[in-house]
Amino acid sequence: MSDNVSNQDSRRRVAFVGSECYPFVKTGGLGDVMYALPRALIRENCDVRVILPLYRCIPEKFRNKLVYRGSFMMDQTMEGRTFFVGIMETVMDGVIYDFIDNREFFDWGNPYTGLWEDIPKYCFFSKASLAILNYLEWVPDVIHCHDWQASLVPLYLRTRFNDTPVGRARVVLTIHNLRFQGICGIQHLKYWSGLPDGLFDYPILKQNEDEANMFKGGLAFADKITTVSRTYAEEIQTPAYGEHLEGHLSYHSPKLCGIVNGIDVEQWDSAKDPLLAADYDAGNFRELKKENKKALQEKLGLEPDENKIVIGLISRLTDQKGLDLVNAIIPRMLDGNTQIVVLGTGDPRYENAFRYYEEENKGTFCAYISYNETLAHLIYAGADALLVPSMFEPCGLTQLIAMRYGTIPIVRETGGLKDTVLPYDAERNEGNGFTFGPYNADLLLEAVNAAKTLYFTERWRWDEMVARDMEKDVSWEASARAYLALYDEIIAWDKEE
């Protein structure tokens, strides 16, 4: 039974627990991280398992590849009701994916249905994730949990599973989106979790007299808390970004750190992208990037003119993304030398505003109110600059993709945008984008105008910045090494004790 003994060799064992993972099921950035980080850790000589619910919405082509690994009954709820736990498994790129099968909880279609139904679902999921690790006799060194849906794992680990083999593991909890916390009535969570009454106090699960907060409890019990950028780790300890958990996070700040996300540099590679009009790299972009600009202009009905600056925006059309600032300055951006391309869907008031600007500025402004993967790639390649003026942005991926494609980011200094985009310094001819600080439309316009000035008056400096951006390491490798250092730190605690 040597397979269940951890720390016998140099390969670290890491179990990922989360509610979604590309390509099986994805609604946001969490799905990308659950896919990319395990693959990067495999390349760093780790053994990795990813534990997911077996939702009905997972495409049949993936379900058909799943292999049955076993099943058992598990007690859940305050009164000890038992539920079926099935284990279906597949392996992809060296990562083992274990899907928890239970039709009562996961056979509803979409991953997230409504908080009242989701609370029982993710109580079961958190407990079952630990139970299957024991069942499979695979004890990880670290269990890495993600967002509120997996936030009860640390509490179960240190209570119900503390004296079992999996109880030897350390646990990390990552905040991807602090806005959603799994808040519900205390009695509702008490019943479905079956956790000890002593956990339902203010320092742990209690939110107020009537409500419990799953994320709050997980943050209290995790060995380490991470979020997806260093700046966001600081911001969430303030009232402006803390979503009413700023005091709790400040208290736990000694175990809180930020590690910026990467991107899949195989999926996003301007030198090998079949969706582009012409592939290019840092050595030949001056000749070939303009071919994509021409193709973008022709595809969207913009006036074909390589001398005009094209500014792109690829985003969910919501307040968080700073679109009220963009909406306020569009008339001043359209100066005869500028074209703007918007791709995305969301709030109808932004959709309608951008449609209006397109109607009034045919050939200069295009609003593509949908999502189109091919067009997204072409905008990253064909635009000269990309707007990311977010109100808040835990990490952000669009600015990383833009840099990979030699498209200069214009961003607000918040979260991961601040951590990844160094503002241009004319005196030193350094930096990889243009930035602004306070959330203000005039300051965004100043940043846009600074970019335009450099583009039109000192193109050689602009091109040097493009080359710097294309050569910047935005892969998952650096992030994976930072997580490995974090894992090693908490694994070493066992040796010290």
Image (cartoon, rainbow, N blue to C red):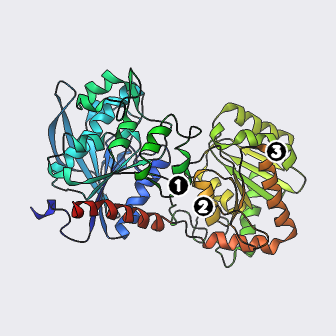
* Quadrant that contains the C terminus: bottom left
**Crowdedness of circle 2 by 10 Å Cα count: few (<14), some, many (20+)?**
many
SS assignment at label 1: loop
- In x, y percent, where is residue 48? 30, 60
Q: Which residue is mark 3?
A: 330
Quadrant hosting residue 316: top right
Instruction: Name the residue: 51% across, 50% down.
Output: 233
Left or right of 164, for residue 306? right
Above/below status of 148 relative to 289: above
Q: Which residue is mark 2?
A: 420
Tell me whether circle 1 and circle 2 mark residues in contact (CB < 8 Å).
Answer: yes
Residue most extreme to the left: 1
Residue type at mark 2?
Thr
Spatial CA distance of label 2 from label 3 is: 26 Å
Residue type at mark 1?
Ser
Instruction: Name the residue: 47% across, 37% down.
Output: 245
- In x, y percent, where is residue 134? 16, 49
SS assignment at label 3: helix
Q: Which residue is mark 1?
A: 229
* Quadrant that contains the N terminus: bottom left
